[in-house]
Image (tube, rainbow, N blue to C red):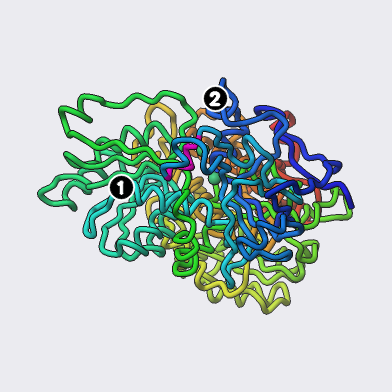
């Protein structure tokens, strides 16, 4: 074999995968490795999107380069002098630091600042990186053998964690400091792990928009308090942090780990007088405003930059051994999926490409939409050996869907907001009795009842704790039955005064909660598990009423339209991960209308589950009530 697969970066948004790139051969001082794992980070995405930092005049990127600077490789060929000096042999699992420097000629290298070498090049930017089957570790690289017990997929975190350790060093922490980490992606979480390891008495405040990242931050460090920026404003959180800090009235150190201008501005609110602001994230923008008078006359801050992790790699490996950061690896895909992988960065934490995984097959009708995310056997989702969870199935459409799935042989988990939800609509008494009743009707004894509110993350989790098996099929049908103490179920979650100009704030919130928020929470809790299993199908029950202007049903239809668009976005995120997502939009008044029955929807659900290759669609089931495009 003389050729290999490699991604080539020809310029901003102009990447392509080729399979006839010659496998490179070693020259003096070089090592050839087979790439085992290639990590993707925010800076790869910024380079792909065309940030000037990479592609502008004097930028770091070179056209035609193989991108990727986070990698683990197994040695295929090595210059004997390097092998001898560093006791590395063919077959060893070895990483090179992400930079190549002159090492002894420029002033910076001579003074221990090799990461700012006058001749500095970064893998995947100035020289070929790791989005390929093979790569060369250049002369002037720093090589590290991966410690035993760390898998290549996990050890790829060494690069970002080294960056985090360097950021920690730059802050010159004191043992009992209070620090804010803004942005709990890979670098932020790595920093939290580093602080937990080397400064266990430092108090950490983690900020992010994603709750799962904040939850992980709390698992990594015992002294970590977190705030979700979607729940509270920056000034509210800054107030709380000032109170936490006591007399000093602010954080000792603010670590900016997101590269977002908003986060940079927020930092000046959090940090105390004479405190330290460490900027770790790389911004897309070349210039971001800063309050210079506050920095000097106001607070006399120390502003610190930091880049790469030159002297931090041994400690990065120590941290990887001591803390369990494996949950930071959220996605693992074959090389062919590089562009989807770049797209997953914002919703995941560490996305890795594994060139040893088989390529995805081209789809055709006889295949399910493809588990390609690993080398497990590809199996098609079969209803009769699936577990289906139908939210809002105590009555009406949800109940009809549960019956249909049970008749097809699925294990069905039925759900109502309360144990007595079926009684609200005179379709039974309790969830337990409903499960027995459905078992009898369908001759399927694998129907499990669960009940509980789905309007908070915690309550969703406590409902899910009652489901023993991984869920293969999720039907979100809960729009009409949540917080039903305010609204009677017969009105399908609608309220009387639902017009854009007159609806009250509380009704607006409750209607969006009931129809959109619950769907979002349930998907966010269940879809990641489907991704791990490389299969799943989500069907969200929308409404045809969301497809036209409505005079008296405004916010209800807005919330259903939000659900439709949510489905499309989710479908885009999971397209390559073996998960299918679609909406079925029942006609208006399906519950009451004689010709328009819940059974029609249930039948459509079964058909859709059996139809491969339909993904991201809204399917009207309304007997032709609406005949125009969605
Ligand atoms: Zn990186
Ligand atoms: Zn140098």
First in residue order: circle 1 vs circle 2: 2
Callout 1 secondary element: helix
Question: Where's ligand 1: which quadrant?
Answer: top right
**Foreground: disc 1 or disc 2:** 1
Q: Report the side of 337 relative to 547 (left or right).
A: right
Q: What crowding class fits label 2: few (fewer than 14 Cα within 10 Å), some (14-19), or many (20 or more)?
A: some
| Residue 223 screen position, x and y as percent | 30, 62
* Distance of label 1 from label 2 (alpha carbons): 28 Å
Most foreground residue, 284 or 1? 1
In reply to whether residue 116 is colored magenta, the answer given is yes
Classify 21 as above or below 500. Answer: below
| Residue 195 screen position, x and y as percent | 35, 58
Q: Bounds of the magenta span?
A: 112-117
Most foreground residue, 448 or 217? 217
Q: Which residue in the protein does label 2 denote?
A: 52
Can residue 423 be seen at all in this image of the molecule?
Answer: no
Quarter residue 449 falls in = bottom right
Callout 2 secondary element: helix
| Residue 366 screen position, x and y as percent | 89, 55
Most foreground residue, 289 or 442? 289
In percent of the image, x 46 and y 32: which residue is there? Answer: 283
| Furthest residue toward left | 247
Q: Quadrant of the C terminus?
A: top right
| Residue 445 screen position, x and y as percent | 68, 79
Can residue 6 be seen at all in this image of the molecule?
Answer: yes
Question: Does ligand 1 reach within 8 Å of label 2's beta carbon?
Answer: no
Q: Report the side of 218 relative to 403 (left or right).
A: left
| Furthest residue toward top | 57
Q: Report the side of 339 relative to 113 (left or right).
A: right
Q: What crowding class fits label 1: few (fewer than 14 Cα within 10 Å), some (14-19), or many (20 or more)?
A: many
Quarter residue 566 falls in = top right
Q: Which residue in the protein does label 1 denote?
A: 171
């Amino acid at each position: 074999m003389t050729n290999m697969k490699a991604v080539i970066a020809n310029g901003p948004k102009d990447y392509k995968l080729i399979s006839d790139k010659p496998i490179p051969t070693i020259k003096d001082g070089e090592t050839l490795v087979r790439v085992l794992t290639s990590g993707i980070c925010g800076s790869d995405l910024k380079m792909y999107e065309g940030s000037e930092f990479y592609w502008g005049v004097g930028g770091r990127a070179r056209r035609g380069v193989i991108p990727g600077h986070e990698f683990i490789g197994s040695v295929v060929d090595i210059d004997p002098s390097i092998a001898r000096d560093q006791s590395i042999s063919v077959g060893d699992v070895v990483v090179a630091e992400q930079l190549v420097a002159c090492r002894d000629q420029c002033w910076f290298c001579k003074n221990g600042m090799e990461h700012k070498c006058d001749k500095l090049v970064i893998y995947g930017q100035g020289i070929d990186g790791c989005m390929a089957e093979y790569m060369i570790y250049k002369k002037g690289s720093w090589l590290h053998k991966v410690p035993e017990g760390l898998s290549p997929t996990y050890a790829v975190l060494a690069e970002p964690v080294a960056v985090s350790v360097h950021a920690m060093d730059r802050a010159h922490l004191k043992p009992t400091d209070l620090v804010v980490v803004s942005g709990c992606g890979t670098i932020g979480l790595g920093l939290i792990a580093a602080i937990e390891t080397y400064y266990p008495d430092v108090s950490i405040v983690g900020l992010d928009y994603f709750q799962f990242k904040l939850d992980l931050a709390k698992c990594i460090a015992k002294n970590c308090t977190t705030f979700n920026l979607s729940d509270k404003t920056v000034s509210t959180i800054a107030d709380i942090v000032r109170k936490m800090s006591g007399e000093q009235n602010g954080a000792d150190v603010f670590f900016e780990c997101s590269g977002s201008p908003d986060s940079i501005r927020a930092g000046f609110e959090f940090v105390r007088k004479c405190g330290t602001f460490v900027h770790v994230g790389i911004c897309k923008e070349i210039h971001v405003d800063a309050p210079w008078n506050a920095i000097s006359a106001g607070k006399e801050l120390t502003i610190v930059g930091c880049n790469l992790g030159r002297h931090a790699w041994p400690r990065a490996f120590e941290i990887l051994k001591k803390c369990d950061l494996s949950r930071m690896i959220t996605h693992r895909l074959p090389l062919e999926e590089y562009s989807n992988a770049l797209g997953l960065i914002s919703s995941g934490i560490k996305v890795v490409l594994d060139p040893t995984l088989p390529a995805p097959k081209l789809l055709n009708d006889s295949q399910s939409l493809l588990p390609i995310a690993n080398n497990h056997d590809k199996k098609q989702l079969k209803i009769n050996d699936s577990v289906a969870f139908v939210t809002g199935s105590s009555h009406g459409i949800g109940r009809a869907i549960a019956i249909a799935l049970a008749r097809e042989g699925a294990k069905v988990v039925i759900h109502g907001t309360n144990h007595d939800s079926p009684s609200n609509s005179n379709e039974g008494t309790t969830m337990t009795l409903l499960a027995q009743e459905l078992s009898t009707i369908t001759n399927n004894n694998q129907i499990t009842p669960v009940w509980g509110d789905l309007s908070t993350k915690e309550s969703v989790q406590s409902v899910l704790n009652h489901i023993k098996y991984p869920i293969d099929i999720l039907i979100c049908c809960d729009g009409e039955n949540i917080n039903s103490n305010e609204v009677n179920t017969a009105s399908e979650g609608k309220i009387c005064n639902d017009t854009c100009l007159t609806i009250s704030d509380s009704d607006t919130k409750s209607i969006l909660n009931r129809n959109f928020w619950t769907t979002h929470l349930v998907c966010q809790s269940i879809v990641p598990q489907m991704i791990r299993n490389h299969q799943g199908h989500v069907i969200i029950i929308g409404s045809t009423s969301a497809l036209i202007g409505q005079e008296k049903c405004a916010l209800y239809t807005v919330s259903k339209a939000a659900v439709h668009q949510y489905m499309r976005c989710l479908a885009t995120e999971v397209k390559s991960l073996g998960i299918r997502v679609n909406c079925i939009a029942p006609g208006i008044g399906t519950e009451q209308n004689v010709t328009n029955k819940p059974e029609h929807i249930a039948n459509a659900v079964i058909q859709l589950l059996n139809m491969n290759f339909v993904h991201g669609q809204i399917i009207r089931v309304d007997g032709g009530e609406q005949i125009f495009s969605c």
